[in-house]
Image (spheres, grey):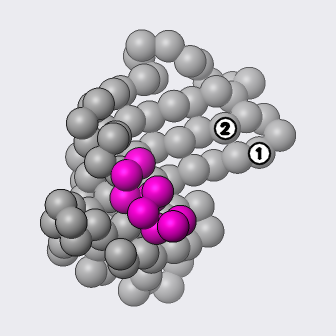
Amino acid sequence: MDKKEGNNWTAYYDSDVNRYFAEIIYTSREGREQYDYEITKEIYDKLGSFSKDYENEELIRTGEMNYSFENTMYGTLGPERLVWDEEANKAMNDCIRKDKE
């Protein structure tokens, strides 16, 4: 299991399924936001090579979003802000679980 991390992001490579995932999470007293992406090997390889951490987040955002959640006092929580790809989300959660074992 390969893993790369920044301030607000974590990226994973799961060799069992040969897939790459990344998550961006912001948590503050105003609320919580989470964005999960399926990314390419090219994106994964570039992560961590930028001098500014937000550049890593911008690169992650070029991947395919498979889940987003926003619950902030300034945002909304509803269908317009919720994207769900059941299979990709399960694969990413399996990858995170393997990393913690």
User: Dot 1: what SS?
Assistant: strand
Instruction: Identify the magenta region.
Output: 93-101
Residue 62 visible in the snapshot: no
**Left or right side of 13 for 74:** right
User: Dot 2: what SS?
Assistant: strand
Residue at (57, 50) in percent of width and height: 25
Viewer-nearest residue: 9 or 51:
9
Residue 65 lies, in percent from the top left, at: 30, 42
Residue at (30, 80) in percent of width and height: 46
- The quarter of the rendered structure image containing the N terminus is bottom left
**Left or right side of 54 for 56:** left
Residue highlighted by disc 2:
32
Q: Main secondary structure of the magenta part?
A: helix
Residue highlighted by disc 1:
28
**Left or right side of 26 for 11:** left
Residue at (50, 13) in percent of width and height: 78
Residue 32 visible in the snapshot: yes
Where residue 21 sits, quadrant-wise, is bottom left
Q: In the rendered image of this protein, does residue 11 appear above or below residue 51?
A: above
Residue 52 lies, in percent from the top left, at: 52, 77
**Which numbered circle lies on residue 96?**
none
* Tags 1 and 2 touching, CB below 8 Å: yes
Viewer-nearest residue: 100 or 37:
100
Where residue 58 sits, quadrant-wise, is bottom left
